[in-house]
Amino acid sequence: MNPTAILDIGSSKIVCLCGSSAARGGTVVHGAGIAEYSGFSETEFLNEADLEEAIFTAIRDAEEMARIRIRDIVVSVPVPFSKLIVTDASFRTESRKDRISEEDIDDLISQSLAKAEAPGYVLMHSTPIWFTVDGYTTPEVPQGQHAGEVSASVSHMYVAEAFLDKLSAILQKLSVEISMCISAQLAESLLLIPEEERVRPAVLIDVGYTHTDISVIENAALTDITCIDIGGAQIARDLSYGLDIPLESAEQIKRKYNFLQGAETGIVQVHLLTGIKRVERRVIDLIVQARAEEFVDLIGASLRMLGIHPESRPVVYLSGGGFSMMRGGCEYLRQKLRLNIRRDMPYMPDMDTPNYTSAFGALDFVLHAGGSDQDTVAGLDTRPGLLNKIRDLFIQ
């Protein structure tokens, strides 16, 4: 049996991973391919030829390392190309002595889905957030329980048809089919945030190169998502413009910057092709701090919009590139936002940095979300009109 392949569409790179389940719930990565590209802005790819070349490169490199031929692949969908709708449904049994059946649960999810309208989007997955059985609310699937009335709140995640069509057309040139699409934020949240911390709403802040995704997850479902158009790229561009240096040199300054160093004086030497340029450290501080403060303000406003406030002491995890990869970045956000932000990373050989969490989250999701029943995951369909009933993949 060939390893499972996933394709993670990031804001600055494409990652293809081929992996399989290991003993005790671990994951074995047989092949990895990583290719940078020009990325996307809002819901548009900046250069489709560049996107196609990056996908070809990532898949080819993963195939060569794993020594397999990829025939089908799972696509991890970023927030700008996703849509989340949460709807409720309920039913009454004929008698409180009746037991809730599997068909009853399926009907609840179907009723909830019927209330969700998403023109131009295709359903990826439907995940129950919680159930209420005769007034008692629980995240557990109440199958087999006696009940008179049952209701459920269900999270429905969609992928944009235009995104799906574009990716399908590119992959068709490689004779690769999309077996299913999954939400990158859901998979990443389930990988990073322990189950016991998702009992109450938890938050994932994923800082990409050009944008930042903020997600709220409760139990095993996303309940809200938003996106802001600032990431690691804006800091580098500000440095490039403000210091009048190439973007590549600005990237190096950004990566070496330390938010914990405090105000310092002195000169920084920037090595250029034309020679060495000397820049005052305080000028670098002014540029980075100005953009960082704007970034904090936007995150804070987004969290408030999502109903997340420091006073409630929410569990918050940080991933991605940008601030996650800058020294002292997590601590800076923790101090400014007054949140206990964590940056815990699972062990990932050779790719043990936060900017690969999304790709590993997608692979882990496909391999382990359904326990030992991996075939259930692989059998999901993303075509319109088909209900992907995968509650068992999320409810532990």
Image (cartoon, rainbow, N blue to C red):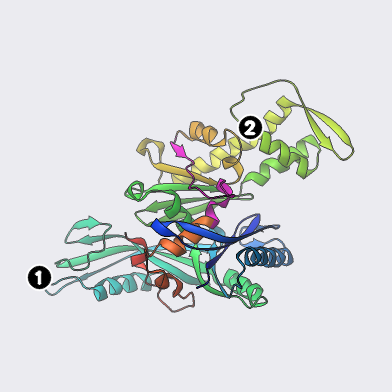
The residue segment tinted magenta is: 339-359
| Separation of residues labelled 1 and 2 (CA atoms) | 63 Å
Write down the residue under mark 2.
289
Write down the residue under mark 1.
97
Above or below: residue 354 compared with residue 3: above
Contact (Cβ within 8 Å) of mark 1 with mark 2:
no
Q: Quadrant of residue 280?
A: top right
Q: Amino acid at mark 1?
A: Lys
Residue 122: within the magenta? Answer: no
The picture places residue 181, in percent across and down from the top left corner, at 51, 68
The picture places residue 391, in percent across and down from the top left corner, at 34, 66
Compared across the picture, whether 71 is left or right of 182 comes to right
User: Is residue 362 at all visible to an observer of this figure?
Assistant: no
Compared across the picture, whether 130 is left or right of 269 comes to left
| Mark 2 burial class by Cα count in 10 Å: few <14, some 14-19, many 20+ | some
The picture places residue 89, in percent across and down from the top left corner, at 29, 67
Q: As drawn, which residue projects farthest toward the right?
A: 274
Q: How many numbered marks does the figure carry?
A: 2
